[in-house]
Image (spheres, rainbow, N blue to C red):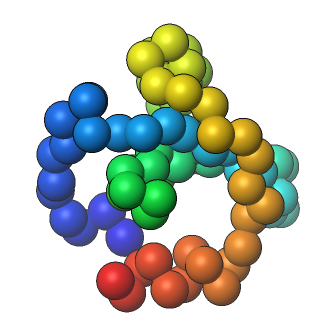
Amino acid sequence: MGLQTKSYKVSTIEGWKYSYLSARGGTYEYLYLYKNGQKVVKISQFYHKNYDEVKRYVKTVFQSLGYEKFSYIDEFKEAFK
């Protein structure tokens, strides 16, 4: 929900995955940063104006872990962690 503020050292992030969410307004890309096998950061093309800039940075600094199919169930579970 964007209510938490946490920070992570770049060296602790093991990589990133991407996903797509289709909605009425179009299809939006999400990036997930992983630490210890778990999503710790979620970056949305819909919510972030500078998404392309952030994505370029993420791609140069972190290893790609591939594609992850978008899941509403996972999103719901993560919202209440």
Q: Is residue 43 visible?
A: no
Q: Residue at x 54, y 84 (%)?
A: 76
For the N terminus, the image quarter is bottom left
Q: Choose top left, top right, bottom left or bottom right for residue 6.
A: bottom left
- Seen in the picture, residue 61 relative to 1 is either above or below; the reply is above
**Figure quadrant of residue 36:** bottom left
Q: Residue at (20%, 65%) from the top-left corner?
A: 4
Residue 39 location in percent, x, y? 45, 59
Residues 62 and 55: in front is 62
Residue sitting at x 72%, y 73% = 71
Horizontal arrangement in the rendering, residue 20 relative to residue 43 (left or right): right
In the picture, measured across the screen, residue 73 lies left or right of residue 57, that is right
Whether residue 36 is visible here, answered yes or no, is yes
Query: Between residues 10 and 42, which one lies in front from this camera angle?
Result: 10
In this rendering, the answer to whether 6 lies above or below 10 is below
Q: Quadrant of the C terminus?
A: bottom left
Picture coordinates of residue 9, whole percent (x, y): 18, 35
Percent x, y of residue 41: 39, 51
Q: Nearer the viewer, residue 65 or 33?
A: 65
Q: Position of residue 43 (x, y in %)?
A: 48, 45
Residue 42 in the figure: left or right of residue 9: right
